[in-house]
Amino acid sequence: AQKITQTQPGMFVQEKEAVTLDCTYDTSDQSYGLFWYKQPSSGEMIFLIYQGSYDEQNATEGRYSLNFQKARKSANLVISASQLGDSAMYFCAMREPGYSSASKIIFGSGTRLSIRP
Amino acid sequence: DTGVSQDPRHKITKRGQNVTFRCDPISEHNRLYWYRQTLGQGPEFLTYFQNEAQLEKSRLLSDRFSAERPKGSFSTLEIQRTEQGDSAMYLCASSLGGGIPSGNTIYFGEGSWLTVV
């Protein structure tokens, strides 16, 4: 069965520094997608970035980039120039192909990121 | 606003009562998901619809839980005879779907908080 592991329950980072949030995954499929979501204290899940398993380039979206290492099954999120508003829970998630049981996404346990001024 | 909307946002109910949550997905999205999230945890998959067909239900979804999407648009999640362990945030999400892995983003609503007293 597929699984997502986030080993950092919490992180503190100084404002304007870069931060890397770790994510490893386990799947037997060759075709899958990886997501990162941000969840502030309000509860809303905000989509940040997506990486497909066949994408050769690492995904980037503004200050967010995904360090995708397929052989190691890792998909770390890198946030450059962190801001106070980046303080939130961050979830790594994976989606497998198909219409039925493989179409849901599963989430890791999350990392709470706190940005210090 | 054309995002995923959920109603009510907050619900406090007495143990044993029934509650119903509604989700309106993004209009052109054919896939709709329900997740449950407890404090400090990542969202857990409950069930998923492709149009009006409920394609998968998690083992977390006991007989007291039922979800419908009668016309392939909005969905309802009903919990009968609520228990204190049902206290959680119930998240709805939607996406475009296809038979191949895609980057079609899964968009979440702001969640419905349930407190059973």
Image (cartoon, coloured by chain):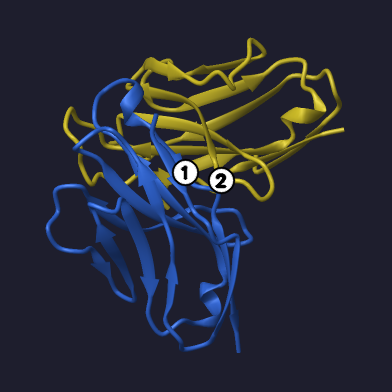
Q: From mark 1 to mark 2, how far is it between C-alphas?
A: 6 Å
Give the residue number, with chain letter if any, for mark 2. B42
Marked residue chain, label 1: A
Q: Residue at x 77, y 29 (%)?
A: B85
In the rendered image of this protein, which colour is used for chain B? yellow
* Spot occupied by residue B96 in the image (x, y as percentages of width and height): 26, 37
Q: Amino acid at mark 2?
A: Gly
Disc 2 crowd rating (10 Å Cα; few below 14, some 14-19, many 20+) is many
Q: Residue at x 39, y 29 (%)?
A: A1
Q: Is residue B2 visible?
A: no
Q: Is residue A27 visible?
A: yes
B117 and B75: which is toward the camera: B117
Q: Work out whether disc 1 and disc 2 sit on a shared chain.
A: no
- Marker disc for residue A49: none
B81 and A72: which is toward the camera: A72
Q: Amino acid at mark 1?
A: Phe
B69 and A96: which is toward the camera: A96
Marked residue chain, label 2: B
In the rendered image of this protein, which colour is used for chain A? blue
* Spot occupied by residue B87 in the image (x, y as percentages of width and height): 74, 35
Give the residue number, with chain letter if any, for mark 1. A107
B21 and A72: which is toward the camera: A72
The image quadrant of residue A84 is bottom right
Q: Residue furthest front?
A: A72
Q: Is the C-beta separation of discs 1 and 2 under 8 Å?
A: yes
* Spot occupied by residue A6 in the image (x, y as percentages of width and height): 49, 54
Where is the C terminus of chain B found, in terms of image quarters? top right
| Mark 2, secondary structure of its residue | loop
| Mark 1, secondary structure of its residue | strand
- B33 is higher (above) or lower (below) than A112: above
